[in-house]
Image (tube, rainbow, N blue to C red):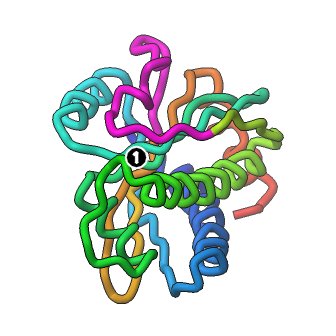
Amino acid sequence: MELAPMHKDVLQEMINIGIGKAAGALNQMTGSHILLNAPDISILEPDNFLLYRAVMEKKDLDVVKLVFQSSFSGVAGLVFEREQANGLVSLLLGRAEVLDTTDALRCDTLREIGNIVLIWILSAIGNLVNAHMDYLPLEHQCYFDTLVDTYIATQDIALRITAEFVVESCRVPGEVLILFNAENFAMLLGAMDSLMERGGM
């Protein structure tokens, strides 16, 4: 499935608002100048998602998972390949060495990055669909299945957002994945249609 161009424009704008606020919060938290971009968004239906999942399960990853609940509910994750996660944490902490995956400071840093990025993106989407979201405690794991253990292949849809962190001229790629059911996806499309009808975009 591909988003209609007008839907993609609206959603891209909402996500850009969210990541802009996330970048500001990260700058304030770290004292570093961080740019955060989301150059592309796409929808993965069940067949495509299963192929995507098979690829991701073969990689060494860091995954920050956030479950959100309300009339609009689902699971969101910030996903990095291990080497990219190490690079981002090292840049932010000013530590040149590659950190062990069990390093508490490394894990806490990734959790805080995920917390800021995911909540600001979800807040922007929540504003679009007019839904207040409640969040369960964050989880940080090193395998992809932690993100998709509640995914229902016949019902759920994934919103895939490519993300890029720029710190000290270094570019660190990652992905944001948001999983929700078909009903919530229809709610999202309806909210975008209403916004366009009101001339909000």
Q: Residue, x 56% and y 32% (percent of image)?
A: 75
On the image, which quarter does residue 28 sit in? Answer: bottom right
Q: Is residue 164 above or below residue 105?
A: below
Determine the residue positioned at 50% across, 60% down: 109
The amino acid sitting under disc 1 is Ser
Residue 149 in percent (x, y) is at: 44, 19
Q: Is residue 98 above or below residue 110?
A: below
Q: Position of residue 39 (x, y in %)?
A: 40, 66
Does the magenta run of residues contain 3? Answer: no
Q: Residue at x 61, y 53 (%)?
A: 115
Q: Which residue is mark 1?
A: 42
Image: magenta residue range: 138-159
Residue 94 point in image, percent of width and height = 40, 81
Q: Residue at x 75, y 52 (%)?
A: 195
Q: The C terminus appears in which quarter of the rendering?
A: bottom right
Left or right: 58 with respect to 62?
left
